[in-house]
């Protein structure tokens, strides 16, 4: 571990703990029973936020407010232009508040400040993109049904959307959902993760400042049980949009099935990158380091599984191992840091369990492989880790570790590479490295994944849809598809000339 590039505590003064309350029907409220919960910073080990802890009373009130705003309010029928104006105003406010949002995001999640700032900037872009989409909602017309008939397909907002988000990209992920729901004309109840509630509260403040009508966006803070569970089962909710673990996603589907709600799920991944012998190994090695260490590997898109051709495996691993030691690692408040803290001690233990099990099964830990103390900080950190000699039967080859841990497998021909890449219950994203365009295209067509990157990793654009196949999810976010998720189709069939032939012949 001594060869790691460690960034010691910067000694930055921490702000006072953030206070978060629920936003229900346009008012900021505490929980009726006064319950709160604290978030201890994973990097600094001190309380950084205290939030109202929602119970049944708060969720039911929030759902009632969203339902009333949809059924009786102006929002669903407001002109797209007006909805777009509001969403653009929110984007401007996000930009103006970037530093404030990024700081609390760092303190609650442990991610590096530079990455948090990038995330907030990217989120503002999503609000602007959704604003543009708000003016494009339209259906179809059918003028070829015969001389007497005209058909119109209307697109309508689906209704009340429950939006449930995880802790790893709290501000970005709520921005992949909420502005699209609002652009469509839906109203919403939002629940951030109990680990990272505060940036969603700030987003609520910005929505209020931008003029969102009362009840259109409601925020309830708290835990999956009872808040998320009620948001997934209450009959007044029309749709649940969830990002999080596959296990919770399955529970949400079960809860939503009693009232047949639409469910949109962005779940886990075990994303492979396949490296062919003709690849640019320097470029691949850097993208592999980025893919697995970005956000400390706590990333649904983590490129946690490398499948490399036997002929270049040693050369590639030497490069990746060297880069692993160079990645600046430590205090997330230092602008140089690229790998921050692990979100909780329990999660760190889980990560380490995967590594120790792989070791016991005969894999070799080339670098990292243990928890790490950053001088001057009290939180939990895990060293950038490369594990070679991984075989497909090991848990570390198939399960989502959600930490800075790279598993390396090898292959000898393209068919074996595809077989190994598809050998997982997940199907979120995949990558291929080769200078031959045919090799890349062949892989892109055969791999089971919602997104494929060729000679790059984890680029993302508001315009490009994102989501998974298999147990990585249902539905798509971003792009035009991200808006469609929140729209329902209504068919209107109109007789436009007299003369309908009577059914009852008198
Ligand atoms: P999680 O599933 O534990 O929690 C996610 C959210 O669900 C939290 O707000 C939590 O409070 C809530 N929740 C918990 N139990 C619930 C229940 N029974 N009903 C309703 N809501 C409930 O996930 P996490 O640990 O916060 O996030 C990590 C997971 O998220 C990883 O598996 C990761 O791959 C996934 N993720 C996926 C994407 C994607 O776009 N595919 C993006 C980011 C994270």
Image (cartoon, rainbow, N blue to C red):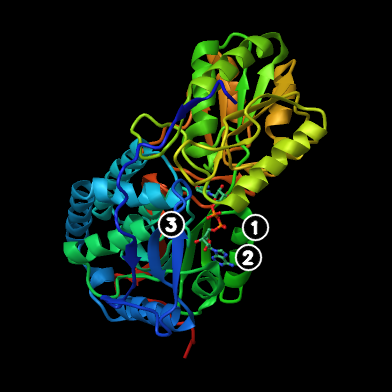
Towards the viewer: 231 or 388: 388
Q: Which residue is mark 3?
A: 196
Q: Around disc 2, counting alpha carbons within 10 Å, would you say few (fewer than 14), some (14 to 19), or many (20 or more)?
A: few
Q: Nearer the viewer, mark 3 or mark 2?
A: 3
Residue 147: tell me if it is visible. no
Q: Is mark 2 within 8 Å of ligand 1?
A: yes
Up-down relation of residue 178 to residue 223 (above or below) = above
Residue closest to the far front: 376
Q: Around disc 1, counting alpha carbons within 10 Å, would you say few (fewer than 14), some (14 to 19), or many (20 or more)?
A: few
Q: Secondary structure at mark 3?
A: loop
Q: Is mark 1 within 8 Å of ligand 1?
A: yes
Q: Position of residue 156 (x, y in %)?
A: 35, 65
Q: Are marks 2 and 1 in contact (CB under 8 Å)?
A: yes
Q: Position of residue 93 (x, y in %)?
A: 19, 53
Which quadrant of the render holds ligand 1? bottom right
Q: Which residue is mark 1?
A: 247
The mark nearer the N terminus, 3 or 1, is: 3
Q: Position of residue 402 (x, y in %)?
A: 59, 43
Q: What residue is rendered at 64% in x and 61% in y?
A: 250
Q: What residue is rendered at 25% in x and 70% in y?
A: 75
Q: What residue is rendered at 64% in x and 35% in y?
A: 370
Up-down relation of residue 363 to residue 53 (above or below) = above
Q: What residue is rendered at 40% in x and 85% in y?
A: 32
Q: Secondary structure at mark 1?
A: helix
Q: Secondary structure at mark 2?
A: helix
């Amino acid at each position: 571990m001594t060869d790691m590039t460690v960034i010691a505590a910067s000694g930055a003064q921490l702000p006072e703990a953030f206070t978060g309350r629920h936003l229900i029907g346009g008012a900021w409220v505490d929980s009726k029973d006064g319950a709160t919960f604290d978030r201890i910073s994973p990097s600094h080990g001190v309380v950084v936020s205290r939030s109202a802890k929602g119970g049944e009373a708060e969720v039911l009130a929030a759902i009632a407010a969203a339902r009333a705003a949809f059924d009786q309010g102006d929002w669903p029928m407001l002109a797209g232009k007006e909805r777009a104006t509001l969403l653009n105003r929110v984007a401007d406010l996000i930009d103006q508040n970037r530093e404030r949002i990024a700081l609390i995001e760092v303190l609650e999640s442990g991610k590096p400040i530079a990455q948090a700032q990038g995330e907030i900037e990217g989120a503002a872009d999503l609000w602007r993109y959704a604003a543009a989409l708000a003016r494009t909602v339209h259906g179809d017309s059918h003028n070829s049904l015969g001389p007497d008939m005209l058909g119109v397909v209307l697109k309508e907002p689906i209704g009340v959307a429950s939006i449930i988000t995880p802790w790893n990209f709290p501000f970005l992920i709520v921005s992949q959902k909420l502005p699209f729901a609002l652009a469509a004309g839906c109203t919403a109840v939002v629940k951030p993760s109990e680990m990272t509630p505060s940036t969603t509260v700030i987003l609520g403040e910005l929505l209020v400042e931008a003029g969102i009508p009362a009840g259109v966006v409601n925020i309830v803070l708290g835990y999956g049980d009872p808040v998320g569970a009620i948001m997934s089962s209450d009959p007044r909710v029309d749709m649940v949009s969830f990002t999080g673990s596959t296990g919770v996603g399955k529970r949400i589907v079960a809860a939503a099935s009693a009232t047949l709600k639409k469910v949109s799920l962005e779940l886990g991944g075990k994303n492979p990158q396949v490296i062919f012998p003709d690849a640019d190994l320097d470029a691949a090695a850097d993208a592999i380091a980025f893919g697995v260490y970005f956000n400390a590997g706590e990333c649904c898109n983590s490129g946690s599984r490398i499948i490399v051709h036997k002929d270049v495996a040693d050369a590639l691993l030497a490069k990746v191992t060297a880069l692993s030691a160079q990645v600046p690692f430590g205090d997330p408040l230092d602008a140089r840091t690229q790998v921050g803290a692990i979100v909780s001690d329990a999660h760190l233990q889980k990560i380490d369990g995967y590594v120790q099990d792989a070791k016991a099964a005969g894999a070799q830990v080339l670098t990292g492989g243990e928890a790490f103390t950053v001088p001057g900080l009290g939180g939990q950190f895990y060293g950038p880790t490369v594990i070679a000699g991984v075989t497909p039967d090991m848990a570390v080859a198939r399960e989502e570790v959600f930490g800075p841990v790279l598993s390396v497998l090898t292959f000898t021909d393209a068919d074996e590479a595809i077989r190994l890449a598809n050998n997982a219950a997940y199907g979120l994203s995949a990558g291929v490295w080769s200078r031959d365009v045919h090799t890349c295209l062949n892989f892109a067509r055969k791999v089971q994944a919602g997104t494929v990157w060729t000679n790059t990793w984890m680029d993302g654009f508001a315009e490009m849809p994102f989501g998974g196949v298999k147990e990585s999810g249902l539905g798509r976010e971003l792009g035009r598809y991200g808006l469609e998720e929140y729209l329902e189709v209504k068919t209107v069939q109109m007789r436009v000339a007299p003369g309908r032939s009577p059914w009852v012949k008198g």
